[in-house]
Image (tube, grey):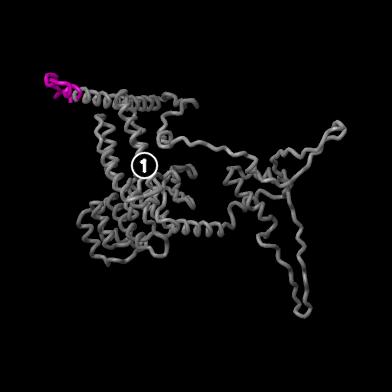
């Protein structure tokens, strides 16, 4: 830009502003580039020291007061609500009542009873509650058979349902180790071994798995849309991902070693065996992925509408399309798997996913609703060096979250007139040219996602964010 800069062309105020704007954007870009080069330079210096047997620059964690840059938009998008604090006593259930009497020896002769002043004291009792069941036993001489009364439901083995419910709660819900749970129970005079405690946590959980399967299927059926997200985690010192699927009625968690589109499909099918289908829909996806025409022609020769299990389909690809590269093969598998998912009849198929803009979520459902908070986070990550650009960013963010609140209002009372107005207002806001290049590029990216961000105008039941996941 500087090579073509001609100062003699600045002949009026408008051109001066234009020139200054270009210079400010150049400075902004150079500043960002300089910061990135410093970071990379430090990494290289640390690596060089490590190779020489020395130590690199220590990674000193920030103090609690300096927790690093916060990309949360909660302050901007939420209006402060007036809190009507209720008395805690109104929410406390009492189990016993005890009358405390005044010592009559300290009362004067004219003292009169005026009622009671209530004081609620919370406490907890943790002790053994063992029951001796006397099971009736009857004998029939004619049949030479003994009849024995059964224990009440849920009482099987040597430990009752309360203890069996408490152990998983402490282990999974409170993150308490087995040894500490064992100590706690033994302190309460419960005679239980470490092996028995371990069995409670790892054995005879078939009904829990069946209950989860039923809950997940009911959850998928409860709304036409589902929130979905993933987050990294460690399993046995290996990188994995926790996949979350939810709506206001339930939340389901799945652990997988990756977060590919095939894995997302596995999650949505509750880890059912993978299937692949070649039909017109799969061929359309192949066109979207821009695979060679020869691939589509080869697949078209197969019986359309036939569903394959995973080993059969992989073997088919090895025979028919051995020349495919890894990425092309992945795209083809995705296309056939998505087509098979949409053809599933025995399990709920999600119509709309509410998620961020990650690629693994795309093309899986008929429609995609993007999270406004994830989109807004990209603006928060802009860190302008020049104060003028900071003011432009802050001003646009105010407009951004005002529009978000208008969408929230629309969800409560949708109408055709508001639908049209908000649609036009989106185009107006996200066609803004501020002169701050990084901000303008981000605005253009938001505008390109209009259909997925404004799906709520056609479906007001959709949430605007994916925070639940």
Looking at the picture, tell me which residue is in the foreground, 191 or 229: 229
Q: Is residue 10 magenta?
A: yes
Instruction: Determine crowd level at label 1: few under 14, some 14-19, many 20+ residues with C-alpha closer than 10 A.
Output: few
Q: Is residue 126 above or below residue 8?
A: below
Residue 454: percent from left, percent from top: 32, 47
Identify the residue at the far top of this view. Answer: 8
For the image, the number of numbered tags is: 1
- Residue range in magenta is 1-17
Observer-nearest of 183 and 373 = 373
The quarter holding residue 314 reads: bottom left
Residue 439 or residue 258, whichever sits in front: 439
Give yes or no for residue 223 being in the magenta stretch: no
**Figure quadrant of residue 381:** top left
Asked if residue 398 lies left or right of residue 158, the reply is: left
Instruction: Identify residue for label 1.
Output: 406
Residue 331 lies, in percent from the top left, at 29, 52
Kindly give the residue lying farthest to the bottom in the view shown: 142
Q: Is 270 left or right of 450, judged from the image as shown?
A: right
Please name whichever residue, 211 or 18, is drawn nearer the observer in this view of the structure: 18
| Callout 1 secondary element | helix
Residue occupying the point 60% across, 48% down: 169
The location of residue 469, given as percent across then percent down, is 44, 46
Q: In this picture, is 236 found above or below 207?
A: above
Left/right placement of residue 287 relative to residue 102 reads left
Q: Position of residue 460 (x, y in %)?
A: 38, 50
**Split into 4 quadrants, where in the image is the N terminus?**
top left
């Amino acid at each position: 830009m500087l090579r073509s800069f001609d100062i003699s062309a600045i002949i009026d105020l408008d051109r001066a502003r234009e020139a200054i704007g270009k210079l400010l954007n150049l400075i902004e870009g150079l500043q960002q580039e300089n910061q990135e080069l410093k970071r990379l330079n430090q990494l290289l210096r640390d690596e060089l020291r490590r190779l020489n047997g020395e130590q690199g620059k220590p990674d000193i964690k920030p103090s609690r007061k300096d927790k690093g840059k916060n990309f949360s938009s909660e302050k901007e998008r939420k209006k402060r609500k007036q809190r009507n604090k209720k008395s805690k006593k109104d929410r406390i259930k009492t189990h016993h009542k005890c009358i405390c009497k005044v010592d009559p020896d300290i009362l004067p002769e004219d003292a009169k009873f005026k009622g009671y002043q209530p004081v609620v004291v919370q406490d907890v009792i943790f002790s053994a509650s063992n029951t001796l069941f006397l099971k009736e036993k009857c004998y029939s001489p004619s049949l030479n058979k003994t009849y024995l009364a059964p224990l009440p439901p849920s009482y099987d083995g040597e430990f009752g349902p309360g203890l069996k419910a408490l152990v998983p709660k402490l282990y999974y819900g409170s993150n308490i180790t087995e040894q500490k749970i064992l100590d706690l129970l033994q302190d309460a005079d419960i005679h239980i071994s470490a092996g028995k405690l371990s069995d409670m946590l790892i054995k005879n959980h078939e009904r829990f798995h069946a209950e989860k399967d039923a809950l997940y299927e009911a959850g998928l059926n409860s709304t036409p849309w589902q929130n979905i997200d993933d987050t990294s985690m460690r399993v046995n010192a290996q990188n994995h991902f926790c996949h979350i699927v939810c709506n206001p009625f339930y939340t389901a968690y799945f652990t997988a070693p990756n977060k590919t589109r095939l894995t997302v499909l596995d999650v949505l099918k509750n880890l059912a065996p993978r299937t692949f289908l070649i039909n017109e829909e799969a061929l359309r996806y192949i066109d979207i992925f821009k695979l060679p025409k020869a691939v589509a022609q080869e697949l078209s020769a197969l019986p359309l509408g036939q569903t394959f299990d995973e080993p059969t389909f992989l073997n088919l690809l090895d025979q028919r399309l051995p020349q495919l590269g890894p990425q092309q093969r992945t795209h083809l598998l995705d296309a056939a798997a998505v087509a098979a998912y949409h053809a599933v009849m025995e399990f709920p198929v999600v119509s709309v996913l509410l998620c961020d803009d990650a690629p693994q979520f795309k093309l899986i459902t008929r429609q995609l609703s993007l999270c406004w908070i994830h989109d807004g986070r990209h603006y928060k990550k802009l860190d302008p060096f020049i104060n003028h650009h900071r003011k432009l960013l802050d001003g646009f963010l105010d407009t951004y979250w005002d529009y978000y609140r208008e969408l929230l209002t629309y969800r409560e009372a949708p109408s055709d007139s508001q639908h049209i107005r908000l649609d036009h207002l989106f185009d107006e806001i996200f066609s803004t040219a501020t002169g701050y290049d990084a901000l303008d590029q981000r605005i253009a990216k938001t505008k390109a996602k209009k259909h997925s961000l404004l799906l709520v105008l056609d479906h007001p039941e959709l949430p605007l964010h994916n925070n639940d996941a």
